[in-house]
Every structure is written in structure tokens, then in C-alpha cells.
């Protein structure tokens, strides 16, 4: 069995034994796993030796919620609430699906950016409308296999028409427009569960580090039998049940309007809250929601940057943690965030919750944010026994940062430096399952220069075609802006019209 010895580094294990206090020593890797952590370790003749002097050795970060579907839309949108932004990033009136070569490049680009930013594990809610095809899902898995990253990958599903998943939509939308958005019969619960079983058989466990993740898009977008069927399969196969819940103020109104109760309590009544459940966002939860979530032992992915950019709000993460919810961190897609860096999310989350009130004890500490970015993320992905900390027997998913840099000079508290001073550019090396997949900030398993060149050559034409799709959907924007405005007025009573006509575009304003 091959060995790698990282000798003489500063080690942050985050395994609970020393908190965020680093130790000086060595890390011995055998095959795909950590064999030992200590001082003056010995390796077999022929082992790879990595000089760890001046380096911080720590667990790879976990991006617990992202969407590779958005990777080519970085920097494309701003000043749009989610319900409007979706019209452009995930248009209802779609164009042709992206071809498989670009699908591969799109996924490979996200994996590359992630690894260079210290993310060794990601959970990708891949969305590929209008159908679910194993061949195209396999293209995404193939890109991640090539990159060397560890990943949970889903084929996210919805089977309730968009207008039936939104409050006020049928009132706001003219009949002729509603007819344009009638896309025929959606996938059935049985059909999607069968697809998931086939995807698990084909891809789960690929390369020893890629898993299939069961991801119904949101409770209001999926029928009850689809939600329960997906949850039962997730429990049966030990996989995450990953769902977007209560991201926006519109969704806070959706539950009471459509189900007579909050979306969390609707899920609880269906029996789909549990250890396997990972909830992305959780911004608009109330005390009763949080009590149910804590009792069920769910995980929540805090997407601080995305929630701010889309104006969704601030998740009550301290109160969620206090009732026993596991906290993880996610970037969301790079169209609603514009970066795949968990370092950015840690810093923003730390600063954001400092603005939550004068009680400093309720703010998030750097140690808590590091926990969320590593072991919390691993737990949300049902991988806490595999990654998220450095410990003998766990997978050798390790990043190495250069400490001979401004971000760590002079050195005070390592956790605070990581959260508030460092960024992905400090990451020099990424090891996944014992393999150096990024070294000296260069990918080792494929020609990244060729990848970038092909993207620069081919993607402009794709984006030009997407611009035409955006134009086709633009007439819908006033209707979805009105849905957002009515939801905000219903929930808080603090919004009013800022324009003269009810459908003149983004004509609402916070007073």
C-alpha cells in the first residue's frame, strides 16, 4: 500500500480532541486513509515525503450546498429577489439543454474552483431540465471523477407546476400566460423513485468518493407522495434527503397559503424530517419550526452570501444550533453567489451574525464556523465518518495552506485567521482520498489550461443563446415581482408600491 508522509507541519485536526488548537507534527497517509498523526512518524522506503514546514495542515472544507447548473452564470445577475432571478438562471421558457461537452466542462470548472479554494467535498444539486437522464447525470459524475473531488450529486426534481407552487400566482398571471407555462404531465413519484434507484445502482460509490444524493427541490414543488417516497429511499440507502426550504419571504407565505401551515410543519406532518434530512437555507423558520427540526435531528446549510445577494434574509442559525440542529455552510450556485469559496461564506457569516443584535454571546465564533465548514458539512452529507476532521482511519481529505503569508503574520489565533483573514488563495495543496489532486495551485489529474481554453472558446456562444432565452422570459418578470411583493406585504406589512402601475416591473420598495 502506498504511503505519503507530511512531515513537520502545523496540524489542525478539528476532531474534538484539541478544539481549534493546532499541534506540531506529521501526518502519515496509507492508501486512501490517515494512518497516524503525531511526531517523528516513520514511513516505508519509497513513500512520498511532503515538507510541511511553514504549512497549515487541516481537513478539507465541505461545501454543503451548491448547483453546478449555474457555473457559467457567474457575474450575470444582481438586484433580483429569488423569484425573479429564477426566471433567468432557471428559465421557465427554456431553450435547448446544454450539450454534454459543455455539461462536462461546467462541472469540471466548479470542481476546479472548489479544490483551489480548499473544498474537497461538495453537495451538488445538479439541475438538468426538463427530463432526468442517467447518461447526462453520468456526465456530471464523470467530471467529478476526473477532477478527484469528493461529491454528493443529485438530479434535483420537482413535479408540481411552478404556478401551483407559488402563492397568488394564479391571481396575478393572466390566463393566456398561464397556458404558455403549461408543460404537460410532470414526472410521477414512482417514476422518480425508480430513476433514483437506477442512479444509485449506476453511480453511488463511483471511484470510492462519489455518491448519489436524493434531492426533491422543495416541499411546495413536489407532491406529498414524491416527498415521502424520496425520504423512504434515502433512509433505506443511508443517503441525504436534501431539500430547499423557507429561503425567501414568498416561501414563508407559501406554506400557510397552500397547506394551512408552515412548510417545515407540513414536512413534519409528512414524516420527512429526520437524521437524513438536510435543509438548505432555513431563513424564514419560526420557533415551532425550529423545535421540530431540532427534535428530528436535521442539518441546515447556511448560505450566507447567496441569501444576502438575493435579498432572502438572514437565517437564525444561533437559535437553530441551540435546539440541536447541525449547522453546515454552503455557497449555493455561483450565479447567486459568484464564488465557490467556503472561506468567503465563513467570513460573511461571522460578520453577518455580529449585526444580529447587541448580545455578543449569540454571535458565531470562528471555531463554530470552522466546525460548520468541515465536520458539520460532512454530517449534512451523511459523511461524518469519512471526512470533516483529521483522525486515523478517516479518509485522507486534507488541505495545506501557506502560513508564510500576510494572512497568518503575525500569528495569533489560528481559527480566527482562517475565518477572517485567509481565503482560498492561501490553499497550496488539496489531497482527496490520499491523492494529491491539486498541488502548488495546479490540478494534477487533467490539463486545466486546456479546460480554460475550451471554455473561453465555446461558452460565449452558449451565453449568447442564453441571452435570447432570457429575453423570451423577460415579460414574466413583472408578474413574479408582484408575487414577491404580495408575499412580503402579507407576511410583514412593510412593503408598498414604489411605482404607479401594479405590473411596471420591480416597482416595490421596502419602507
Image (tube, grey):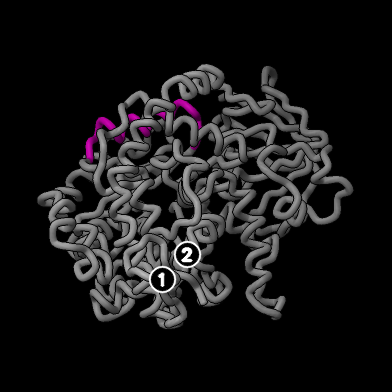
Of residue 203 and residue 8, the one placed in the foreground of this image is 203
Give the side of residue 48 with respect to residue 73, left or right.
Answer: right
Pointer 2 and pointer 1: residues touching (CB < 8 Å)?
Answer: yes
Of residue 184 and residue 412, the one placed in the foreground of this image is 184
Query: What type of secondary structure mainly makes up the magenta span?
Result: helix
Label 1 Cα crowd, 10 Å radius (few <14 / some 14-19 / many 20+): many
Q: Is residue 140 magenta?
A: yes
Magenta highlight range: 132-149
Of residue 319 and residue 504, the one placed in the foreground of this image is 504
Residue, far front? 500
Q: Which mark is residue 316?
A: none
Q: Is residue 474 magenta?
A: no
Name the residue tied to disc 1. 249
Asked if one can make out residue 78 in the rendered structure from this viewpoint, the answer is: yes
Label 2 Cα crowd, 10 Å radius (few <14 / some 14-19 / many 20+): many
Q: What is the x, y in percent for residue 232?
A: 25, 59
Give the side of residue 47 with respect to residue 163, left or right.
Answer: right
Residue appearing at x 83%, y 37% in the figure: 404
Q: Quadrant of the N terminus?
A: top right
Res. 240 image quadrant: bottom left
Q: Is residue 276 above or below residue 443?
A: below
Residue appearing at x 26%, y 77% in the figure: 257
Res. 370 image quadrant: bottom right
Q: Which label's residue is closer to the chain start, 2 or 1?
A: 1
Q: Which mark is residue 312?
A: 2
Give the side of residue 43 with respect to residue 293, left or right.
Answer: right
Q: What is the x, y in percent for residue 434?
A: 57, 32
Amino acid at each position: 500500500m502506498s504511503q505519503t508522509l507530511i512531515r513537520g507541519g502545523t496540524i489542525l485536526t478539528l476532531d474534538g480532541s484539541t478544539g481549534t488548537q493546532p499541534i506540531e507534527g506529521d501526518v502519515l497517509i496509507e492508501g486512501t486513509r490517515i494512518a497516524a498523526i503525531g511526531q517523528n512518524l516513520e514511513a516505508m522506503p519509497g513513500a512520498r515525503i511532503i515538507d510541511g514546514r511553514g504549512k497549515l495542515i487541516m481537513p478539507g472544507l465541505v461545501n454543503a450546498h451548491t448547483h453546478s447548473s449555474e457555473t457559467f452564470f457567474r457575474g450575470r445577475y444582481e438586484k433580483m429577489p429569488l423569484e425573479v432571478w429564477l426566471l433567468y438562471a432557471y428559465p421557465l421558457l427554456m431553450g435547448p439543454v446544454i450539450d454534454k461537452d459543455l455539461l462536462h466542462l461546467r462541472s469540471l470548472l466548479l470542481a476546479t474552483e472548489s479544490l483551489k479554494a480548499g473544498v474537497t467535498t461538495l453537495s451538488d444539486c445538479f439541475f438538468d431540465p426538463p427530463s432526468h437522464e442517467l447518461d447526462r447525470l453520468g456526465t456530471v459524475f464523470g467530471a467529478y471523477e476526473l477532477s478527484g473531488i469528493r461529491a454528493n450529486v443529485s438530479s434535483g426534481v420537482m413535479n408540481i407546476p411552478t404556478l401551483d407552487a407559488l402563492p397568488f400566482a394564479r391571481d396575478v398571471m393572466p390566463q393566456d400566460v398561464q397556458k404558455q407555462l403549461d408543460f404537460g404531465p410532470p414526472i410521477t413519484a414512482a417514476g422518480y423513485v425508480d430513476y433514483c434507484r437506477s442512479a444509485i445502482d449506476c453511480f453511488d460509490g463511483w471511484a470510492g468518493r462519489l455518491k448519489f444524493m436524493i434531492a426533491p427541490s422543495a416541499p411546495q414543488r413536489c407532491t406529498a407522495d414524491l416527498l415521502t417516497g424520496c425520504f423512504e429511499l434515502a433512509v433505506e440507502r443511508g443517503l441525504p434527503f436534501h431539500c430547499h426550504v423557507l429561503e425567501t419571504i414568498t416561501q414563508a407565505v407559501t406554506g400557510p397559503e397552500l397547506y394551512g401551515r408552515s412548510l417545515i410543519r407540513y414536512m413534519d406532518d409528512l414524516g420527512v424530517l429526520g437524521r437524513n434530512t438536510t435543509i438548505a437555507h432555513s431563513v424564514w423558520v419560526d420557533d415551532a419550526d425550529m423545535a421540530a427540526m431540532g427534535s428530528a435531528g436535521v442539518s441546515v446549510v447556511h448560505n450566507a452570501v447567496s441569501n444576502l445577494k438575493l435579498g432572502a434574509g438572514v437565517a437564525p442559525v444561533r437559535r437553530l444550533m441551540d435546539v440541536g440542529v447541525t449547522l453546515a455552510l454552503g455557497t449555493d450556485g455561483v450565479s447567486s453567489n459568484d464564488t465557490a469559496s467556503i472561506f468567503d461564506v465563513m467570513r460573511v457569516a461571522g460578520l453577518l451574525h455580529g449585526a444580529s443584535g447587541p448580545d455578543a454571546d449569540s454571535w458565531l465564533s470562528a471555531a463554530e464556523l470552522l466546525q460548520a465548514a468541515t465536520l458539520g458539512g460532512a454530517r449534512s452529507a451523511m459523511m461524518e465518518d469519512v471526512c470533516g476532521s483529521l483522525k486515523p482511519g478517516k479518509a485522507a481529505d486534507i488541505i495545506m495552506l501557506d502560513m508564510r503569508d500576510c494572512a497568518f503574520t503575525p500569528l495569533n489565533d489560528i481559527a480566527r485567521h482562517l475565518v477572517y483573514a485567509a481565503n482560498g488563495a492561501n490553499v497550496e495543496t488539496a489531497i482527496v482520498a490520499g491523492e494529491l489532486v491539486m498541488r502548488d495551485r495546479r490540478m494534477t489529474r487533467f490539463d486545466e489550461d486546456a479546460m480554460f481554453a475550451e471554455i473561453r472558446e465555446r461558452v460565449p456562444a452558449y451565453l449568447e443563446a442564453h441571452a435570447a432565452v432570457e429575453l423570451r422570459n423577460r415579460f414574466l418578470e413583472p408578474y413574479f415581482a408582484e408575487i414577491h411583493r404580495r408575499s412580503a406585504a402579507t407576511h410583514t406589512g412593510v412593503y408598498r408600491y414604489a411605482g404607479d402601475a401594479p405590473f411596471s416591473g420591480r416597482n416595490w420598495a421596502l419602507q
